[in-house]
Image (spheres, rainbow, N blue to C red):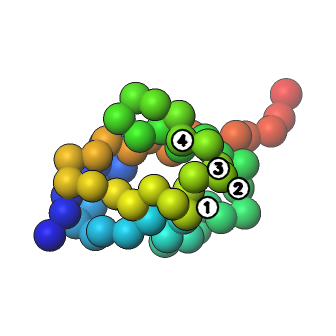
Amino acid sequence: MIKVSVNGSINDNSYSVTTLIKELKLEKSRIAVEINNEILPSSMHNKYFLKNGDKIEIIQAVGGG
């Protein structure tokens, strides 16, 4: 079992960043994904598979003014 931290919460699943985004229902949102303090380009979301101990931060763009 793999444990990763997503926005401060521990998650016990192992899958790609794309799958994580779908599970969190963020696939239609404008987001930025940071893994272990490095931005992951959106072109790499389906190629990067989460590893034990990864720290993931997902930031969602919100419009307004």
Measured Cα–Cα span from mark 4 to mark 3: 6 Å
Crowding near the residue tagged with mark 4, few <14, some 14–19, many ≥20 C-alpha atoms within 10 Å:
some
Q: Position of residue 28 (x, y in %)?
A: 72, 63
Disc number for residue 29:
2
Asked which secondary structure carries label 3, the reply is helix
**Kind of residue indicated by mark 2:** Ser
**Is there CB contact under 8 Å for labels 1 and 4?**
no
Give the residue at mark 1: 26
Measured Cα–Cα span from mark 1 to mark 4: 16 Å
Disc number for residue 40:
4
Asked which secondary structure carries label 4, the reply is strand
**Kind of residue indicated by mark 3:** Ser
Measured Cα–Cα span from mark 1 to mark 2: 5 Å
**Is there CB contact under 8 Å for labels 1 and 2?**
yes
Give the residue at mark 3: 42
Q: Position of residue 8 (x, y in %)?
A: 31, 43
Q: Earlier in the sequence, mark 4 or mark 2?
A: 2
The residue lying at 28 percent from left, 46 percent from top is: 54
**Is there CB contact under 8 Å for labels 4 and 3?**
yes
Measured Cα–Cα span from mark 4 to mark 2: 16 Å
Asked which secondary structure carries label 2, the reply is loop
Crowding near the residue tagged with mark 2, few <14, some 14–19, many ≥20 C-alpha atoms within 10 Å:
few
Outermost right residue: 65
**Kind of residue indicated by mark 1:** Leu
Measured Cα–Cα span from mark 3 to mark 1: 13 Å
**Kind of residue indicated by mark 4:** Leu
Measured Cα–Cα span from mark 2 to mark 3: 12 Å
Q: Position of residue 50 (x, y in %)?
A: 34, 57
